[in-house]
């Protein structure tokens, strides 16, 4: 399954990046996300790991906020584009090839681990959350942003909206918005059959994270009108955050 997902993102990297380039160049487009991360991660400079960075969609805005950002992805094409986007944005990000379920970092390395629209694609979310918890420092935070992409029934309005959004994307971003991940792969994903974000909270707790919280207002807080037209048919985007407990002194 992992190979199929990587192949999909490698083949679709350039199409996907067309929208990301526009997003990164727009102060209005990035402003909501920066505000969101400032609220939940604070404004002091942090050492942050972005897992599944793609073409740098959130690692680059985070770096522009003054954070020291390392970003990993399994797709070589995505990483190539991310490096170019970082140069164009005049920020420094340490991009590396890496597996979300087997990170190439020591324990307790980062102040925060973040990702956006990644956990739903991970074959083994339990292993992934444990890895992210392992590399974050005690007192540090794991923060994911995701949605119910393929789980649950969609209303008639959502179905019509989805087709309209694909047309909007195809025209505005000049890419084939009807190209999808293999339906068999989607059916094999844990997230397709999950009750989210409730199941995400359990994953966070089982990974040893405490003070787990869910925020359901990401769309309202971070989306522009264009984002809403493109993605609103999926339903609410949520943020789940947990804290790695401090090591108890003996």
Image (cartoon, rainbow, N blue to C red):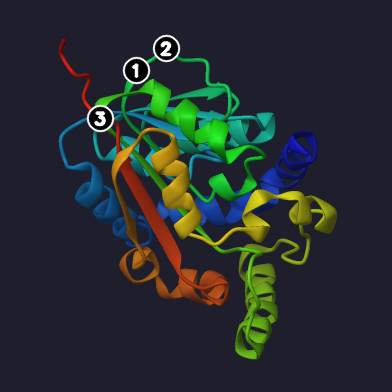
Question: Image height check: is 73 above or below 109?
Answer: below
Q: What element carries label 3?
A: loop
At which x and y percent is residue 91?
Answer: 36, 32
Q: Name the residue under label 3.
A: 245
In which image quadrant can residue 217 be found?
Answer: bottom left
Does residue 93 show up? no
Residue closer to the observer: 207 or 167: 207
**Nearer the viewer's eye, disc 2 or disc 3?**
3
Does residue 83 show up? yes
Residue closer to the observer: 98 or 242: 242
Question: Image height check: is 18 above or below 72?
Answer: below
At which x and y percent is residue 137?
Answer: 29, 23
Residue closer to the observer: 213 or 11: 213
Q: Is residue 131 left or right of residue 163?
A: left
Whether tag 1 and tag 3 are in contact, CB under 8 A, the answer is no
The residue lying at 56 percent from left, 64 percent from top is 148
- What crowding class fits label 2: few (fewer than 14 Cα within 10 Å), some (14-19), or many (20 or more)? few
At which x and y percent is residue 43?
Answer: 16, 41
- What crowding class fits label 1: few (fewer than 14 Cα within 10 Å), some (14-19), or many (20 or more)? some
In which image quadrant can residue 65 be found?
Answer: top left
N-terminal of the pair, mark 1 or mark 3, is 1
Distance between mark 2 and mark 3 Cα atoms: 17 Å
Q: Name the residue under label 1.
A: 109
Residue closer to the observer: 66 or 112: 112
The residue lying at 38 percent from left, 55 percent from top is 239
- What crowding class fits label 3: few (fewer than 14 Cα within 10 Å), some (14-19), or many (20 or more)? some
N-terminal of the pair, mark 2 or mark 3, is 2
The residue lying at 26 percent from left, 31 percent from top is 140
Q: Name the residue under label 2.
A: 106
Distance between mark 1 and mark 3 Cα atoms: 15 Å
């Amino acid at each position: 399954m992992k190979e199929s997902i990587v192949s999909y993102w490698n083949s679709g990297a350039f199409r996907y990046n067309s929208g990301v380039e526009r997003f990164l160049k727009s102060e209005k487009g990035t402003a909501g996300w920066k505000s969101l991360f400032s609220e939940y991660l604070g404004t002091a400079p942090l050492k942050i790991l972005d897992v599944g960075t793609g073409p740098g969609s959130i690692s680059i805005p985070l770096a522009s906020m003054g954070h020291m950002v390392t970003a990993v992805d399994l797709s070589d094409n995505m990483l190539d584009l991310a490096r170019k986007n970082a140069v164009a944005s005049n920020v420094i990000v340490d991009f590396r090839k890496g597996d979300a379920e087997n990170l190439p970092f020591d324990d307790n390395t980062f102040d925060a681990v973040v990702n956006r629209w990644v956990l739903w694609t991970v074959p083994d979310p339990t292993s992934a959350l444990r890895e992210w918890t392992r590399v974050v420092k005690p007192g540090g935070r794991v923060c994911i942003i995701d949605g119910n992409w393929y789980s649950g029934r969609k209303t008639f309005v959502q179905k019509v909206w989805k087709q309209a959004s694909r047309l909007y994307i195809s025209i505005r971003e000049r890419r084939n918005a009807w190209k999808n991940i293999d339906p068999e792969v989607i059916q094999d994903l844990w997230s397709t059959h999950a009750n989210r974000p409730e199941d995400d909270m359990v994953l966070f707790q089982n990974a040893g994270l405490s003070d787990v919280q869910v925020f359901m207002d990401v769309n309202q807080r971070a989306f522009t009108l264009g984002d809403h037209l493109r993605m609103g048919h999926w339903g609410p985007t949520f943020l789940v955050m947990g804290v790695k407990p401090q090591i108890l002194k003996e």
